[in-house]
Image (cartoon, rainbow, N blue to C red):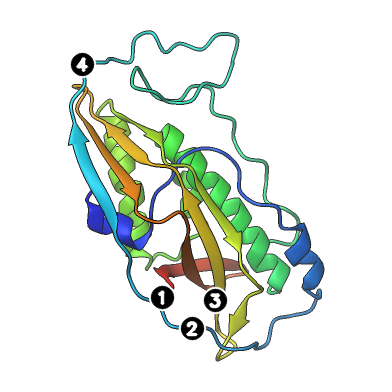
């Protein structure tokens, strides 16, 4: 994975996402039509560093089904699968978007710890090439015997969704993430870390085939 990829969508690993109770309470349960327009977006930077390590996956064994985070000795173990999405996540409502984003982020964080993005893909449009490339790159890392340390993402909704045309909807989010380290099978490591404590992302979604699909995301200027 290259640093330019991280500029666009900073990076991923374990844990759950956000509390949506406040925002959900503010969203009326009606079909979405249109809402106020949003702002423009630009790109932001992230830094990359490389190092080497002689560590192997041996010695990172969890017992009795205990969850264990990834470290220099090996990948995360016994990663719990997220719960099923909340009822109503497919509906064309503000709550539907927020519940879709919540479920997607949880499965993204599962994927970075396990190399399994099959569920995370279900929330994307097939045209979301940038996000899909991230998934392929990390899956390939796991398939060749590597893994990821850290990288946990938190996308917290910053307001409610809006649309300019009644078709494409946008959601502004606050994005926080840990540093992201990729460990190769031979022990080589490459780490990315953000130069910001928090980034603002805007996600674009459309309601297609009875569900919300994430088209793309951009850093908001």
Task: Give the label, 3 or 1, closer to the camera.
Answer: 1
Lower position in the chain sequence, tag 2 or tag 4: 2
Q: Are marks 1 and 4 in contact (CB under 8 Å)?
A: no
Residue where numbered disc 2 is placed: 39
Q: Residue at x 40, y 64 (%)?
A: 126
Q: Which residue is mark 1?
A: 221
Q: Height in image: 153 above or below 89?
A: above
Query: Which corner quadrant of the image does residue 195 belong to?
Result: bottom left
Q: Secondary structure at mark 2?
A: loop
Crowd tier of the residue under label 1, counting other residues whose Cα lies within 10 Å: few below 14, some 14–19, many 20 or above: few
Which is in the foreground here, disc 4 or disc 3?
4
Between residues 45 and 105, which one lies in front from this camera angle?
Answer: 45
Return the x and y of residue 188 as percentages of the image width and height: 19, 27
Circle 1 sits in a helix, a strand or a loop, which is it?
loop
Residue at mark 3: 170
Give the numbered dot on residue 54. 4
Disc nearest the viewer among 1 and 4? 1
Q: Residue furthest bottom?
A: 165
Give the Cα separation between the discs numbered 3 and 1. Answer: 15 Å
């Amino acid at each position: 994975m290259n640093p330019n990829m991280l500029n666009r969508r900073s990076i991923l690993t374990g844990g759950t996402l956000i509390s949506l109770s406040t925002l959900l309470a503010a969203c009326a349960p009606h079909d979405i039509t249109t809402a106020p327009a949003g702002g423009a977006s630009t790109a932001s930077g992230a830094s990359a560093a490389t190092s080497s390590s002689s560590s192997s996956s041996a010695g990172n064994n969890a017992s009795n089904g205990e969850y264990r985070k990834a470290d220099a000795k090996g990948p995360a173990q016994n990663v719990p699968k997220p719960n099923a999405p909340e009822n109503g996540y497919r509906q064309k409502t503000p709550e539907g978007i927020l519940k879709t984003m919540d479920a997607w982020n949880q499965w993204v964080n599962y994927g970075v710890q396990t190399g399994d993005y099959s569920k995370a893909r279900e929330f994307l449009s097939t045209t979301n090439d940038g996000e899909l490339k991230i998934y392929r790159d990390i899956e390939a890392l796991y398939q060749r015997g590597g893994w990821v340390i850290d990288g946990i993402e938190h996308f917290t909704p910053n307001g409610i969704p809006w649309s300019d045309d009644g078709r494409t909807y946008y959601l502004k989010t606050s994005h926080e993430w840990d540093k992201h380290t990729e460990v190769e099978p031979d022990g080589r490591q490459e780490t990315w870390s953000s130069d910001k404590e928090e980034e603002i992302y805007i996600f674009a979604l459309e309601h297609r085939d009875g569900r919300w699909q994430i088209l793309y995301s951009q850093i908001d200027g």
